[in-house]
Image (cartoon, rainbow, N blue to C red):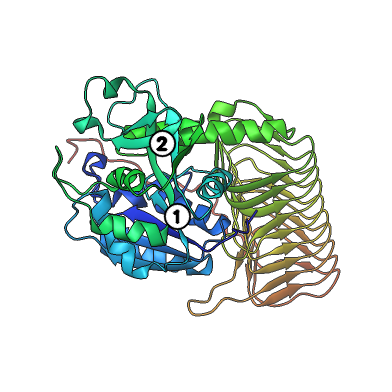
Amino acid sequence: MRLTPPFPIDVVIMAAGKGTRMKSRLPKVLQRLAGVPLVQHVLNTAAQLNARSAVVVTGHGADQVEPLVLASGQLLAVQCVRQEPQLGTGHAVQQAVPALADDGVVVVLSGDVPLTQADTLQALIAQCGGQQLALLTLDMVDPMGYGRIVREGESVQAIVEHKDASEAQRQISEVYSGIMAVPARLLKPWLARLNNQNAQGEYYLTDIVKMAVANGVEVVAHKITDALQVAGINSPVQLAELERAHQLRQAHALMVQGVRLQDPARFDLRGHLDCGQDVEIDVNCVFQGRVSLGEGVRVGANCVIANCTIAAGAVIHPFTHIDGEQLGVSVGEGALIGPFARLRPGAQLAAEVHIGNFVEVKNTTMAKGAKANHLAYLGDATVGERVNYGAGSITANYDGANKHRTVIEADVHIGSNCVLVAPITIGAGGTVGGGSTITKSTAPGALSVARGTLLSIANWKRPQKVPKGAP
């Protein structure tokens, strides 16, 4: 749900870090969580805030990061600024200053913190109110490496980075998440006054807290308890841990809605999944893109399902692969798919269609009750009601330059190991004998057989192997 802010929101996303511990040629913010680049998660959240703009601060791997984030322009207005060299978080936000209007509230996010929720940020923005500096904080059992929130009573006085903290300050469990909301008109002069007189020789964004206090601007903290929302990623281990935590949370949300998951620890959602009542999903299934499962759908183990709609009562047997890509795939009510079936873009299957093991369907419509149960290929075809399509049969839809369509009318029976060379129409009620190669359209009700004459040689002797060492 998109939220309507009471004043303009401009988001700054810090995405310049090298991510050395990832040990990857791919920039850290392009590593994938639930199938989506980390920085794209952050941009999606900014869009939910109805942000006026997003300024992405790039550095290491900018030539890879910038094309991806600029392609997100359909969600909100995005621009990139470079931070070269990387001299700290304050220096990063300084690079964004020319792109920030004075009338907005700036929300500072990190490109490697993907799971912050829009409602959390909205609450933070509300506490800022266009007048105050608001920090997102939480208590941590092990706050090692995080900046500590120093309070005087309830009032925040400073954030002290771990390396600069005294022993007493390191005992503080409340930490700064790296996320803040601050009016741009206040932020800009504070940024201009930053220095690097600290243990790391960097320009800390957190130093603006002391400046706010000195200027009489109230600093407030919105403390949350959900550490997953502010978890950053710096290594493959952390990425894998956050992936599992995120997937388990998604699995629990589906189960609350009534979905039966055989094992929520063996479930992966890398997109959006809508489920009707009494949906059952077995182990090791992966859902990508946008998938809709109707009431009573059953999905067997080890299926990969992407960009499709599956109607009520359909059964997807184990090891089935469905991916509609841009065209989509639809599976009708009560259809039986798999095991080991593959549905490709443009497969449109009506009610009670059967697609069996090792059958591939691409850009094909199949009417009610049509069946292709074994080892077959249907590409660029229109298949009528109650057609029975034999094992080993294919539509030869490609002539080396162009694709052509095969039409198989209602109640046709295609025997095993047939080749239907498109463009061609098999007339209603017709039969094609097994092993036939059909190159011309056939009349309704006709039996069509096109195979070579049988040649049988009596008493034929197979060639014999010559024994080793024989002359």
Residue 61 versus residue 218: which sits nearer the camera? 218
> Which quarter of the figure has residue 253?
top right
Residue beneath label 1, please? 40
Q: Residues within 10 Å of mark 1 (few under 14, many from 20)?
A: many
The reply to whether residue 14 is in sight is yes
C-beta proximity under 8 Å, tags 1 and 2: no
Q: Amino acid at mark 2?
A: Ala
Q: Is residue 247 left or right of residue 80?
A: right
Numbered tag placed on residue 231 in the rendering: 2
Instruction: Please state the horizontal and vertical placement of residue 324, each as a whole percent of the image.
Output: 60, 58
Q: Relative to residue 158, is residue 181 depicted above or below?
A: below
**Circle nearer the N terminus (1, 2):** 1
Q: Amino acid at mark 1?
A: Gln
Viewer-side residue, 56 vs 283: 56
Q: Residues within 10 Å of mark 2 (few under 14, many from 20)?
A: some
Tag shown at residue 456: none
Q: Secondary structure at mark 1?
A: helix
Q: How far apart are labels 1 and 2 at the CA level?
A: 16 Å
